[in-house]
Image (spheres, rainbow, N blue to C red):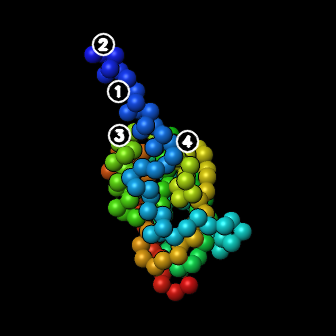
């Protein structure tokens, strides 16, 4: 009886957590309002190509844009491991990384990121509405800690 109760409690916890994570509502969201908003493809002013490698690096790792600019990031995974390009504040990326360590197979469907299998290419279209620094990172376990991160410097003038 005791084992049955433990089993039911465990299932209830996991079912609740699964719904929360499937909805993308982990780490309090990804703080996207602090970094801008999803862009409209037809309004993209530039395309920036980003390469992700198994050396745990992005090329380029720094990008400069203007406030208000809509950028089409074309992201390629040239490695043999799964990688992602995830835009956010540094604090939100760190919080999301902590969740990814607990749930490494977590899937995402959010406009500020693209997760890619080896050899695949995807895109993120983003409008940078505020001046400052926006961060990007790969949050697969071990990748962020290995230095797979970069920054977008958003200039003040539109």
Residue 82 screen position, x and y as percent: 49, 42
Q: Nearer the viewer, residue 74 or 42?
A: 42
Q: Residue 79, can we see it?
A: no
| Residue at x 38%, y 33% (from the top left corner) | 13
Q: Distance between the residues labelled 2 and 1?
A: 12 Å
Residue under label 3, please give it.
102
Single out the residue that lies furthest toward the right.
42
Task: Say which of marks 4 and 1 sits in front.
Answer: 1
Q: Earlier in the sequence, mark 2 or mark 1?
A: 2
Q: Distance between the residues labelled 2 and 4?
A: 44 Å
Label 2–label 4 contact, CB within 8 A: no
Label 3–label 1 contact, CB within 8 A: no
Task: Say which of marks 2 and 4 sits in front.
Answer: 2
Single out the residue that lies furthest toward the left.
2
Local secondary structure at mark 4: loop
Residue under label 1, please give it.
9
Q: Which of marks 3 and 4 is nearer the N terminus?
A: 3
Q: How far apart are marks 2 and 3 (CA)?
A: 29 Å
Q: Which of 73 and 9 is in front in this view?
A: 9
Local secondary structure at mark 2: loop
| Residue at x 45%, y 69% (from the top left corner) | 34
Label 2–label 1 contact, CB within 8 A: no
Single out the residue that lies furthest toward the top.
1
State the mark number for residue 1. Answer: 2
Q: Residues within 10 Å of mark 3 (few under 14, many from 20)?
A: few
| Residue at x 57%, y 78% (from the top left corner) | 68
Residue 157 screen position, x and y as percent: 52, 86
Label 2–label 3 contact, CB within 8 A: no
Task: Say which of marks 3 and 4 sits in front.
Answer: 3
Q: Earlier in the sequence, mark 3 or mark 1?
A: 1
Q: Residues within 10 Å of mark 2 (few under 14, many from 20)?
A: few
Residue under label 4, please give it.
117
């Amino acid at each position: 009886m005791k084992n049955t109760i433990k089993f039911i409690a465990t299932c209830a916890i996991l079912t609740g957590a699964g719904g929360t994570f499937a909805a993308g509502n982990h780490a309090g969201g990804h703080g996207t309002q602090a970094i801008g908003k999803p862009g409209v493809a037809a309004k993209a002013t530039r395309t920036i190509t980003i390469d992700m490698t198994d050396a745990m690096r992005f090329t380029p790792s720094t990008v400069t844009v203007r406030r208000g600019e809509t950028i089409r990031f074309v992201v390629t995974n040239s490695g043999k491991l799964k990688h992602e390009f995830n835009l956010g504040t540094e604090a939100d990326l760190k919080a999301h990384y902590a969740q990814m360590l607990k749930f490494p197979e977590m899937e995402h469907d959010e406009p500020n990121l693209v997760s890619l299998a080896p050899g695949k290419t995807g895109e993120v279209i983003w409008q940078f509405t505020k001046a400052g620094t926006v961060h990007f990172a790969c949050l697969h376990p071990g990748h962020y800690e290995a230095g797979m991160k970069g920054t977008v410097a958003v200039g003040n003038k539109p």
